Amino acid sequence: MTDYEQFKKDILELTGIDLNAYKERQMKRRIHTLSTKYGFKTYNDFFQDLKKNAEHRKHFMNYLTINVSEFYRNPQQWEVLESKVIPELLTKNKHALKIWSAACSTGDEPYTIIMIMKEMFPNVKVSLLATDLDDKVIEYAKEGCYAQKSIANLPQKYVQKYFKKEANGMYRLSREIMDCVEFKQHNLLADRYDTNFDLIVCRNVLIYFTEEAKLEVFKRFHSSLRPEGYLFIGSTEQILQARSIHFEPQFSFFYKKV
């Protein structure tokens, strides 16, 4: 396949997704796999199809996002969140927290946060926004039904209290937890960011972005946090120029706005 540069321009105009922000080799491989599946050999032929075929276009947009998620992924990090970060945030505002789960995938992380808050900080009012580019995973999250492997790392007290095992072996999350999360579609590279968050959680998605795109997103996260708010990133990530954009590393994978 040739003329990837023109394809990127066309896709930006058609969908608002800037492929320049993604690592090229990885993105080309994913696009090639999908275009081959549809029977196209050139970027232009594939683009012409995406322009005309709304179903293919939607599938393409969702396919670009890599969704890997599970409840309580990397347990030690969640323990730091509940034992150190949240108590510190509550010294500033004892009664309420505003949280954003960015690139939330199938909802495992925002729902984990709500369970922790209900168990450990039941008197705190939580406003939790969960966003993702992929509307299919948002719909999945709203269903609140998960396979056993998704909850394998979750402490048993949460499984027993907030899930009900169904006849098909899936685990249904209680409405008490689901009703606490507001889901929205959102493009980290193009859409407006809300402000005054106490905590932003964005884990294991920026690894697919170029260094330039990552830095821009981190700067925008910084602007979205209130002073001394926290950014919680994934175990495969780090902010290389943290202090230059006014983030202070506090604990592993937690950065404070300074």
Image (spheres, grey):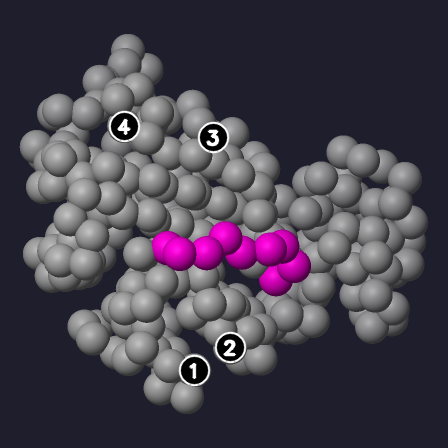
Where residue 188 sits in the image (x, y, percent)? 56, 58
Q: Earlier in the sequence, mark 1 or mark 3?
A: 3
Q: CA distance from mark 3 to mark 2?
A: 30 Å
Identified by mark 2, the residue type is Leu
Q: Quadrant of the N terminus?
A: bottom right
In space, the residues marked 1 and 3 are separated at their CA atoms by: 35 Å
Nearest the eye: 102 or 224: 224
Q: Please tell me whether mark 1 or mark 3 is closer to you in this view.
A: 1
Amino acid bearing label 4? Ile
Of the numbered discs 1 and 2, the one sitting upstream in the chain is 2
Checking the image for residue 177, the label placed there is: 4
- Determine whether the residue tagged by mark 2 lies in a helix, strand or loop: helix
Q: What residue does disc 2 label?
A: 215
Mark with earlier residue (1, 4): 4
Nearest to the eye among marks 1 and 2: give it.
Answer: 1
* SS for callout 4: helix
